[in-house]
Image (cartoon, coloured by chain):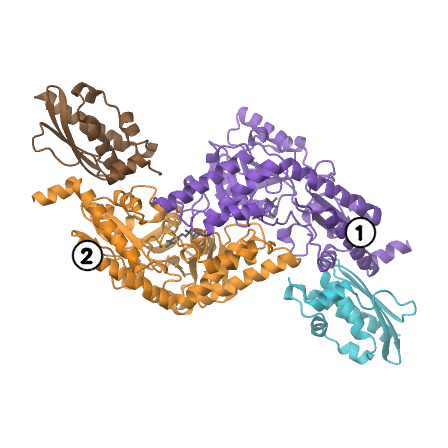
Chain colours: A brown, B orange, C purple, D cyan
């Protein structure tokens, strides 16, 4: 149960919270089991993520993963973003007990969905 | 702000137990003087506990906590009474230690009726009456709930059980979990007429790991922890003398200071609720506000989830609980709040603030500020909050 | 002189637990910082206990004492394994908390084989081997006896159980009650190969009311105290944080000071026995003297009964036990001494002297004098002593 | 279980322990359940108990009752001795829990037996 300091900091001071008015990739994922929600909005230009914002509802790991993910995405290429793993998100918030790792999975799913949206166009 | 989860140990209680952590280390089962000294100390504590609830000393059995008291009461009575029936009545909002044992019995062929508590979090006596069957051997309804503090109609249930027993259903017993109620409201087992009543030291400014079960004289119960003559054969195992002494002292103090503590926590709680209500929108108070312990406030904050709020508050030095302390390791929404008919979102957004005798006005004001900040921050990232704005 | 009944709390242990009786009062189930502080303290203690017996921390479950550890081990394993058989092997000299649970199971249809211990008070491995049946699911043999201190061949039993399991009898488990052994002889669960092992804090200079059960990874066991997520769902109930911290510290000290304590008590015990033997006639030492704990001496004094001797000694400030501390409230002759084949008179005249790390040569000398005086006085009024003179 | 101070004193300093060489009433009773034994020897003259001695083996209450009884008997008349009750013995040692009262019963039985012996002659 103990959360890392960086985890708590993401919670107390979320990075990149909100929605982008000029996003060109938006996706929301819901965890069907617990109802946690994560919404990502990205502004992608020339295969690079210029800006990323998140909104999240649910247990603390979901919020922290959203914040960490949005922060990691900004400035990265779409290719880099596609390669992002669940573990990288987990590491970014200082680790998660195995029972909580579904939060990072939700984040990665939301990201893939958002990226697929761009690719589909 | 989390005094329902546990309380700090009163310094007078520490002082009372200290001699038993140092020189007076006897085993209460030993015949020699060290043993007799320990035995006398345990018996004094037994009288102190008995006196808190107007019981007789020999009706008190010491246990390792409220959980064991509940296990012993329910399993003990059910084992003894099973020839007469295998039906139990309980409420939908019992503590996990009652809920868990009943689920275990259910798996072993018992039938459990779980009474609704409606939106106020209080069981209705008509429902209890209607649920009694010929094969009902136990009614277990808590005195006061651990999450929302609501006080159940235990006196009415006690009278009903007594009447049912007198009309011929001899093997019906009434157990009440008074772990949260004890030290917070006056308890009189003659008044409540319960047959069994559970207590826990650490909710009363004494150490964790000690509790007691009141077993009314004449009530048959099978011991659960076996193999020793302690506690008149009702609970084997070397008595935790220092903790028991502490528990006794705490009970004595609780009795003496009951009114004062009640007034104090009620004043703080009301101050807190008024301020929160004036500062924060979209909140729902959980549990009948006129019929609850003076020290508890349970509030659901819309659009956000309790765990994040808890961590936010913790970082600001304010300790609170989501759901029951015991089940907060898992992230299921509180079954108690759900039993009030609240939707999933409100059940997940419920936070329990619980005040103690040593809290101050300033603690309350700091907490209100912290809550306001945390709720604002979490709502700013919540998709639910955004959606509610746009509709 | 009664350190097998209980031990004084080491002042270093009191110091270690004090912060948890004062500022650090959190509930280890709470998520906030007070809770996490408590959780961390409990986990540290878990590692300390594990390290005393070379186990892994997650194989340790805290209980309310040795009695609960024994109950949990035996009832828990038997409930889990009953589909595979209902036969248990044990020794004739187990502690009441093992004996009691087995008698309870026997009443519920289980078959119990109680192995003899012969005049030395030690089980024979051939007997264990011969007793194993296809439906045996548990062997429970204590590591060291509480009355006579004899050390059982647990390593051989462990190897036998392992071999039996490997030859196909998968559901056979081995439990050993190490309450008296712990802190007095080195214990290594890899060496002993037991599946379950019971400990109690108050025999190791920590407070009464706390114990632990080692449950080897993979061993299936039904929890007995239900209704909370504590101890990885193996034992519900708020953890007794201060006592657990104390227990952990005591385990650490026991490990560090094991050799020294062993030597010290052995020297005192031998001094005592030599002096008693040279001063008092008609005595019998109980239990194999080469194969026992270094701190115990159990002696039967002919012609007299233990209780009178105990009271005599108590009046001279020397605390001892007759029979097991836990059953000394009744006056039945010790079943342990009877199991050695001693006649009724010797069984009733048995006294346990048990030494601790803080005893001195002077304590021993005072005790010897006191024993000599008391035995002389009691024999002077004993018709048995007169008769023996006249024959 | 706690014994009174007077009880303990009887144990540590038994009164009238031993056997009378010139006793004219001797009786021994054994408790068949636990094997406790109490032997009384009395010297009776002119319906008065001039001297009384006891020997006892068994649990502490048996020893204390023996001592208390022997002390009470000395100097009393045979009639008084016959009227002695179990409760008087119990009171003389400062009380006994109900589970231990059989010790006083044993004492009274030994006394009756001794007195009967004289009467029979
Ligand atoms: C209502 C209620 N019953 C029982 C318990 C369990 O008591 P303990 O913590 O002593 O095991 C608690 C503690 O959380 C409680 O609140
Ligand atoms: C061998 C043995 N097992 C178990 C116990 C019971 O432990 P506890 O006193 O902690 O209940 C004792 C204590 O007397 C003991 O000596």
In the orientation shown, which residue stands out farthest toward the front?
B362
Whether residue C276 is visible here, answered yes or no, is yes
The residue under label 2 is B277
Q: Position of residue B145 (x, y in %)?
A: 33, 56
Quick check: C353 above or below B38? above
Report which quarter residue A63 is drawn in: top left
> Mark 2 — on which chain does it sit?
B
B228 or D113, which lies in front? Answer: B228
- Horizontal side of residue C354 vs A37, given as left or right: right
Secondary element at image label 2: helix
Q: Can residue B188 be seen at all in this image of the molecule? A: no
Splitting the image into 4 quarters, where does residue B132 fall? bottom left
Query: Height in image: C171 above or below C268?
Result: above
Label 2: few (<14), some or many (≥20) within 10 Å? Answer: some
The lab-note entry on whether marks 2 and 1 share a chain reads: no
Reading the image, the residue beneath label 1 is C302
């Amino acid at each position: 149960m103990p959360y890392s300091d960086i985890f708590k900091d993401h919670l107390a001071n979320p990075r990149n919270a909100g929605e982008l008015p000029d996003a060109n990739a938006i996706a929301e994922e819901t965890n069907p089991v617990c109802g946690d929600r994560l919404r990502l909005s990205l502004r992608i230009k020339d295969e690079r993520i210029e800006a990323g914002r998140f909104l999240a509802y649910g247990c603390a790991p979901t919020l922290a993963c959203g914040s960490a993910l949005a922060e990691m995405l900004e400035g990265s290429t779409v290719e880099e973003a596609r390669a992002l793993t669940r573990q990288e998100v987990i590491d970014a918030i200082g680790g998660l007990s195995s029972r909580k790792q579904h939060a990072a999975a939700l984040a990665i799913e939301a990201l893939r969905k958002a990226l697929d949206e761009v690719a589909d166009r | 702000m989390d005094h329902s989860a546990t309380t700090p140990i009163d310094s007078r209680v520490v002082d009372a137990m200290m001699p038993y952590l140092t020189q007076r280390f006897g085993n209460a089962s030993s015949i020699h003087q060290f043993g007799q000294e320990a035995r006398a100390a345990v018996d004094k504590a037994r009288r102190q506990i008995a006196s808190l609830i107007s019981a007789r000393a020999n009706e008190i059995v010491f246990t390792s906590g409220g959980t064991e008291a509940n296990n012993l009461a329910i399993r003990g009575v059910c084992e003894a009474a099973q020839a007469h029936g295998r039906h139990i009545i309980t409420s939908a909002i019992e503590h996990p230690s009652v809920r868990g044992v009943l689920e275990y019995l259910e798996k072993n062929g018992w039938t459990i009726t779980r009474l609704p508590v409606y939106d106020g979090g209080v069981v209705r006596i008509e429902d209890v009456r209607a649920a009694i069957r010929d094969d009902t051997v136990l009614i277990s309804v808590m005195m006061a709930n651990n999450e929302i503090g609501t006080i159940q109609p235990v006196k009415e249930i006690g009278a009903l059980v007594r009447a049912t027993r007198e009309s011929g259903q001899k093997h019906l017993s009434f157990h009440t979990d008074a772990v949260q109620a004890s030290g917070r409201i006056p308890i009189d087992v003659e008044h409540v007429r319960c047959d069994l009543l559970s207590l826990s030291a650490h909710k009363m400014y004494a150490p964790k790991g000690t509790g007691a079960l009141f077993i009314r004289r004449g009530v048959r119960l099978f011991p659960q922890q076996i193999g020793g003559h302690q506690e008149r054969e009702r609970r084997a195992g070397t008595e935790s003398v220092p903790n028991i002494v502490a528990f006794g002292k705490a009970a004595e103090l609780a009795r003496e200071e009951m009114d004062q503590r009640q007034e104090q926590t009620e004043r703080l709680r009301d101050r807190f609720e008024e301020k929160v209500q004036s500062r924060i929108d979209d909140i729902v108070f959980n549990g009948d506000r006129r019929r609850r312990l003076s020290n508890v406030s349970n509030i659901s904050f819309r659009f956000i989830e309790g765990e994040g709020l808890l961590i936010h508050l913790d970082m600001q030095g304010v300790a609170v609980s989501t759901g029951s302390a015991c089940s907060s390791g898992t992230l299921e929404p509180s079954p108690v709040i759900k039993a009030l008919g609240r939707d999933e979102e409100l059940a997940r957004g419920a936070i329990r603030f619980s005040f103690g005798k040593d809290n101050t006005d300033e603690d309350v004001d700091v907490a209100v500020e912290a809550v306001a900040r945390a709720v604002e921050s979490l709502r700013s990232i919540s998709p639910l909050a955004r959606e509610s704005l746009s509709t």
